[in-house]
Amino acid sequence: MVHAIACPQFAGFTVTMDNDHTGDDIGQGFSPADAFDKCSADPNCMGFNSNGWYKTSSTPNLASTGLCLYEKTQAGKLV
């Protein structure tokens, strides 16, 4: 498990620190950057977390210390 001190930015995603969404997993990347690539390429993916899990939904969210939750945006709006 990766515990973030700061959340890196990924184009096309908004990020919330100390947050996660449980379940709705499609798969797990080797890193947040790998999950970003996989989620960006999958139209069914709505987000991923800093542990690399990419998901079909990014809501509802829950407090999760040390994690970063990335939610896919479209034209500057959350999908």
Image: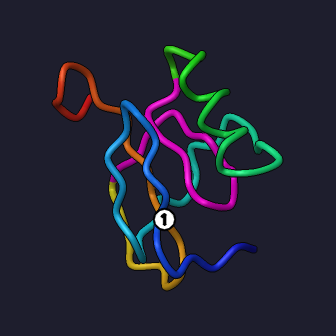
Residue drawn at x 39%, y 71% is: 17
Position of residue 37 measured from the top left corner of the image (x, y, whole percent)? 64, 28
Q: Is residue 20 left or right of residue 29?
A: left
Residue farthest toward the right in the current orientation of the protein: 30
Residue 75 in the image: state x and y as whole percent. 19, 19
Residue span colored magenta = 45-59
Most frequent secondary structure within the magenta stretch: loop
Residue that numbered label 1 is attached to: 68
Q: Residue at x 65, y 50 (%)?
A: 32
The relative height of residue 45 versus residue 16 in the rendered view (above or below) is above
Q: Secondary structure at mark 1?
A: strand
Residue 14 location (% of width, % of height): 32, 46
Q: Residue at x 29, y 30 (%)?
A: 73
Return the residue nearer the eye: 21 or 34.
34
Q: Is residue 49 left or right of residue 29?
A: left
**Quadrant where the N terminus is found in the figure:** bottom right
Colour convention of the picture? rainbow
Amino acid on which the number 1 mark rests in the picture: Cys
Check residue 35 for magenta coloring: no
Image height of 45 relative to 50, above or below: above
* Magenta stretch contains residue 53: yes
**Quarter-of-image position of residue 22:** bottom right
Image position, residue 47 (x, y; %): 47, 40
Q: Residue at x 54, y 46 (%)?
A: 48
**Can you say which quadrant of the picture contains the C terminus?**
top left
- Is residue 31 shown left or right of residue 73? right
Asked which quadrant contains residue 41, the reply is top right
